[in-house]
Image (spheres, rainbow, N blue to C red):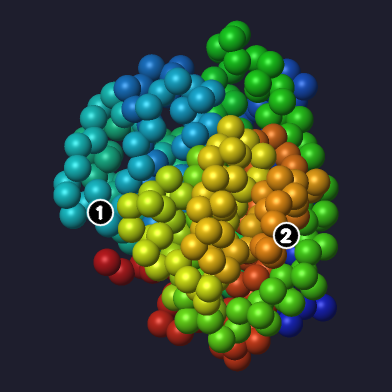
Amino acid sequence: EQIKKGSYDHFMQKEIHEQPHSLTTTMRGRLKDSGVLLGGLKEYLKTIRRSRRVVFIGCGTSYNAALAARPFVEELTGIPVAMEVASDLLDRQGPIYREDTAVFVSQSGETADTLFALDYALENGALCVGITNTVGSTLSRKTHCGVHINAGCEIGVASTKAYTSQIVAMAMLALAVGSDQISTQARRNVIISGLSSLPSKASEVLKLDAEMKELASSLIDSESLLVFGRGYNYATALEGALKVKEVALMHSEGMLAGEMKHGPLALVDENLPIIVIATRDACFSKQQSVIQQLLSRKGRLIVMCSEGDTSAVCPSGSCRVIKVPEVADCLQPVINIIPLQLLAYHLTVLRGFDVDQPRNLAKSVTTQ
Ligand code: G6P
């Protein structure tokens, strides 16, 4: 069946707005009151629980999705998580052990670097798990087991709905692996109910579309954009900046807010726009102090915060604020990325660039 844009101007726009639905299809039939059911992993849960490390491997947006998953995978499973960009693992021929669970994340399931890294992990005897959107892809055939994210076909080169569905698939993986731990049962219940609320929260946050278009028009001539995040939302900062870079062709960097003092602070002036992600979680007060430090250097701030927190994040009223609905803290990255996807989309249109086929990029990079 031919996929059409329908009432949308671009596939990227359609895919951003489809997220309430794609998140629903990722979870369909998998969330139970008693826990999570992932047919493709069932036989392997015991082996994963016994592994010495979980190693996440991917490229681009898929790597960022794995980075978003890292904190809750560590929390719910107690297993240390290592992060590997596929090409860098291969360049270093980094250590992969028989006792490792290597989790490969790829929308297409055909990215060359990721597939070479998969061959390498298989040779080294690791248990290989695939998280992909493409049934029958090389990744899904070569891994021992895995989870299909079922987000529906993604056409825009810049990945949007696959990113949020990948995070949700990894949250379900973490819940399934951690399901034998009595001490985290209450926390798992909170996350399961957070997962079921995601589609409606995604619909809510999509209402920021016009506001993000307006914000985009104020940034149209900027040369650069910084995005500061930490904790659960470090990945959101990297992914938001990647979206702006790849489609709007604007220099943009995602940064760990905890590293601000070690270099990035030198860039701050009244012209450089800086997005600070400061939604509610254990890092909130640290982000409040980052905002204060940036404001004292006259930074041009756009703060993303939970509803009702405007004055808590910016008592002086001198920041622009993006208010997002709150979900369970570890799932907040699924919601927080959506306004940044909208921002990147509108910036691209306003700057007159090709949204669905950005210059020099391909949907799936099948050569090394
Ligand atoms: C390309 C695409 C990105 C994507 C990356 C990884 O660079 O332009 O949008 O994130 O490949 O692709 P994969 O299919 O492995 O997720």
Which numbered disc flags the more N-terminal residue, 2 or 1? 1
Residue at the (71%, 22%) spot, across then down = 189
Residue furthest to the top = 182
Label 1: few (<14), some or many (≥20) within 10 Å? some
Asked whether, in this view, residue 54 is left or right of residue 16, the answer is: left
Looking at the image, residue 333 sits to the left or right of residue 126; the answer is right
**Residue at horizontal 50 percent and vertical 45 percent from the top:** 230
Which sits in the foreground, 317 or 168?
A: 317
What residue would you read off at disc 1? 88
* Residue positioned 38% across, 60% down in the render: 264
Can you give x and y, in whole percent of width and height, for residue 309 in the image?
Answer: 75, 46
Q: Which residue is mark 2?
A: 317
Q: SS for tag 1? A: helix
Residue at point 60%, 84% (across, down): 220
Lateral position of residue 189 relative to residue 210, left or right: left
- In the rendered image, the quadrant that contains the C terminus is bottom left
Most distant residue in the left direction: 92
Q: Position of residue 8 (x, y in %)?
A: 77, 78
How far apart are labels 2 and 1 at the CA level?
43 Å
Q: Quadrant of residue 18?
A: bottom right
Which disc number belongs to residue 77? none
Q: Quadrant of the N terminus?
A: bottom right
Q: Amino acid at mark 2?
A: Gly
